[in-house]
Structure formats: structure tokens, C-alpha cells
Image: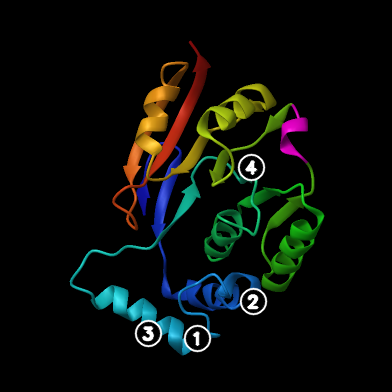
Amino acid sequence: MIKGKKVGLRAVEKEDLPFLRDWRNIPDFRKNFREVRELSLTDQEVWFNSLQNSKYINYMFTVVDLNTNTITDLGTGGGFPGIVLAIMLKNTKKKIKINLYEKSHHKSVFLREVSRKLNLDTEVIQNDIFGTTELKTGTIIARAFKPLPVVLELVYKNFISYKNLILFMGKSGKEILEETLKVWDLDFEQRKSITSEDSFLLNIKKINKK
């Protein structure tokens, strides 16, 4: 595991494969993948072994909070990235709960069903997080949720305690970050994405307005 002060990156391990297979085979997820057929554990093992034996560097990892037992996914939708992280964390010794905020009733029902079937340590909170205040958590995560300035405003106003904020920034992320820094004073680190040359992870530790 690569460890920072508050967050670690753990490689996907062979013990994760049954849970990845179960998640990967959920029909609402499977239809959005390049390979739409249902996968067996053998298929997952072949995929895992191909990564291990590849001459190219192709890491798959999960984010682990080292200092708290709660992660909050701001607007999880179909479970990205909250459900995926819950699957990965299931095999770790440290007990970490993931709060999944989703205002849609139908999506919330789906998330609860997935969590129940896979026995994940999650809590699905069917609520508009913009209307929820005085929140406390460890790491906050979000992917394809709201524009960066909107997310910063939300965390700044609605969270009274948190460790850090991890955001997945896309192709236009650099330009958005540059504009945002004109208004916000951020203590942050950037980590390059391993799946896209144009994307990166943004790990924000402190948020203040200028």
C-alpha cells in the first residue's frame, strides 16, 4: 500500500475478485461496459493474471482512508465510486463505512439492493445533500457529480468536519482548476490518472475562500 498522511492506495488483490465479479455482473452496471456478457470467476482471474503478467504498467487500485472509518460519496448515482470502494474495502482488516448520498428514490432502492446482496458496509441516504448541514465524515469523494466550484461550496458550507476531499477530474480539469483557484484557496495534491492521460485525481485537504 502507498500511504500518505491520511489516504492510502491499495492494489486490487486476488481475494477481491469474487466481489468484483458480483458487482460487474449486476445488469444495470454490465450494460455499460465494453464486455456486456456475464463474467465467471475464471474470467475475472484471467483478467487479473493478464494485469500481473503484462509488460506494461497497468495498476488497478482502491482508495483507503487511513485515519477514519467513514467515507462519504456526495452523489453516488449508480454507485460510482462508492459501491466500488465498498467492494474493495470488504477484504481489508480495517472497518470503513461508506455513506452513499442519493436523492433519487429509484437509485436509492437499487443501491440498497446491491449493498444487501454483496453484504457491503454502506448506508444509503436518500436525501438532497445540499439541504443537509453540519455533516461530519472522514474522506469525501465525488465523481461526475457537480462542477468543482459547486462541490467546494457544498463542502465549505455543509461539512463541519472532514479529513479530505478526493475528486476525479476529467479532460477539462486543469482549466477548471486554474479558474477555481482564482476564487478558492486550496491545500491540494494532484495525482495522474492511470486510465486516462487527460484525467487526474485531486486530493484537497483544506478549503478556504479568498
Is 38 placed above or below 4 here? below
Q: Which dot marks residue 41? A: 1
Q: Which dot marks residue 187? A: none
Helix, strand, or loop for circle 1? helix
Spatial CA distance of label 1 from label 4 is: 31 Å
21 or 3: which is nearer to us? Answer: 21
Q: Earlier in the sequence, mark 1 or mark 3?
A: 1
Residue type, numbered disc 4: Leu
Disc 4 crowd rating (10 Å Cα; few below 14, some 14-19, many 20+) is many
Disc 2 crowd rating (10 Å Cα; few below 14, some 14-19, many 20+) is few
Is 194 placed above or below 119 here? above
The boundaries of the magenta stretch are 128-133
Q: Which residue is mark 3?
A: 46
**Magenta stretch: residue 127 in it?**
no
Residues at marks 3 and 4 touching, judged by CB atoms closer than 8 Å? no
Residue type, numbered disc 3: Val
Spatial CA distance of label 3 from label 2 is: 21 Å
Q: Which residue is mark 2?
A: 27
Q: Which residue is mark 4?
A: 74
**Quadrant of residue 52 within the rendered picture:** bottom left
Residue 195: x and y in percent read 34, 58
